[in-house]
Image (spheres, rainbow, N blue to C red):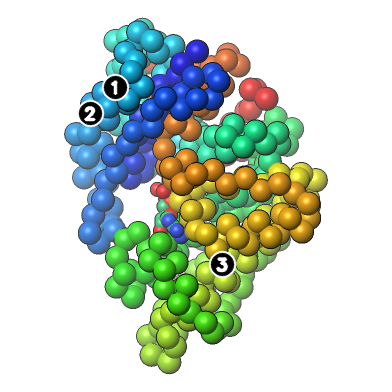
Amino acid sequence: MICLGIESTAHTFGVGIVNDKGQILANEKDAYTTKSGGLIPNKLAEHHVECCDAVWKNALRKAKLSMKDIDVVSYSASPGLGHALRIGAMFARSIAKIYKKPLVGCNHCIAHLEIGRMISRAKDPVLLYVSGVNTQVIAYESGKYRIFGETLDQGIGNFLDSFARHIGLGFPGGPKIAELAKKGKNYIELPYTVKGMDVSFGGLLTNVKQKYDSGKYKVEDICFSIQETVFAMLTEVSERALAHCNKDELVLGGGVACNTRLQEMVKIMCSERKAKCYIPENRLLVDNAAMIAWLGLIMFKAGNSVKPKEAGINPYERTDDVRVNWR
Ligand code: ATP
Ligand code: FE2
C-alpha cells in the first residue's frame, strides 16, 4: 500500500509518499519565508496555492510513480493556521476526488510522534515535540496520545526566534543562537520555570532581553546560558514523563530537536536511566509530509477515512482529542 500525504499546517507545503514497509519514496516541500520572519496569513495561503501543484508533481517524479499507483491520500487536518490548513485540505480533496482515492485527515503533532516511532522502531515512546509553536511531552495511554507536559505560554522555537529577532539575528533564530552559544563560556543564572511537567518561557524572554539591553553581558554568554537553561528544562520534563508513564524510550520531534546541545542533554539523561533515545534525521524532525503520509497510511489500515465533502480542518485540535484506533 502506498500513501501520498500533504503537509500544510504552517510555513511548509509538502508532499510525501511512503509505502507500508515504511520506505519514504518522496518527501518534497516548499517553505514560505520572509526576511523579517513575520508571517502574513493571506500571503502564506498564496504561497501554498502557487507551489502546491509543482511540489505534488515533484514528489510523484521523485518516487517514479503516478497517481494510479497511489492507494490513499492523507493531509494535515489539524492543528495549525487556518489559512494554511485550508489550502492543504482543498488540494487533498481535489486529488482524492479526481483520482478516486480514499482520504484521511491527520493530526500533525501525532504525525511527528508516529514517524519517530516508525523510523526508530520504538514500541511505546514518550515524544518530546519541540518546534516553533509547539512544546509538548506526549505519550500513549488508554487509547489516546496524552499531553503530559507542555508550554504554558509560547513554544520553545518562538522563544528562540523572538530573542534572535531582538538582537538582530534574523529568522530562523534557533540555529543562529546555537552558533553563538558554542562560543559562550560563562553561565549566567537565568529564570528556570518548570511546573510539574509544564514549562514556561515568557518571563525568561523578558529577562534575557533586559540582560542583552543592559550591555553588561557578552551575547555569546547569553546564548550559551539560554541553551543550557531551556534545554535543561525540556530534559527535566522529558525525564519526569518517562518516570511517570513508566516508559523507557524517548523520541524527539520538531525543528528545535535539530539542536545538538539539546540532543546531547537528552541522550545523557536517557543513558543514566537506561532508556533508549531516538533522534530521527533533521529532514524528519522539521515539518515534513512524509510523516503525514505515514500516519495516513497506518490510520487508513485501521479503518479511518473521510468523505471528500466532509474533509475539513480543525486549527485548534489538541493531540488528546484524537481517538487512537491504530495501535
Ligand atoms: P510546528 O508547526 O510544528 O510548530 P514549525 O513551523 O515551527 O513547526 P519546525 O521546522 O518544526 O517548524 O521548527 C522551526 C523552529 O525550529 C524554529 O523556531 C527554529 O528557530 C528552530 N530550529 C531549527 N533548527 C534549530 C537548531 N539547530 N537549534 C534550535 N532551534 C532550531
Ligand atoms: Fe511540526
Q: Which mark is residue 54?
A: 2
The residue shown at (55%, 63%) is 261
Q: Does residue 293 appear in the picture of this structure?
A: no
Alpha carbons under labels 2 and 3: distance apart: 39 Å
The residue shown at (25%, 36%) is 48
First in residue order: circle 3 vs circle 1: 1
Q: Amino acid at mark 1?
A: Arg
Q: Amino acid at mark 3?
A: Val
197 or 152, which lies in front?
Answer: 197
Alpha carbons under labels 1 and 2: distance apart: 10 Å
Q: Secondary structure at mark 2?
A: helix
Give the residue at mark 1: 61
Q: Secondary structure at mark 3?
A: helix
Q: Does residue 89 appear left or right of residue 36 in this picture?
A: right
Rendered location of residue 233, percent (x, y): 62, 65
Mark 2 neighbour class, 10 Å CA radius: few under 14, some 14 to 19, many 20 or more: some
Q: Does residue 68 appear in the picture of this structure?
A: yes
Instruction: From the image, state whether disc 2 or disc 3 is nearer to you.
Output: 2
Rendered location of residue 26, percent (x, y): 38, 28
Q: Secondary structure at mark 1?
A: helix
Give the residue at mark 3: 230
317 or 186, which lies in front?
Answer: 186
First in residue order: circle 2 vs circle 3: 2
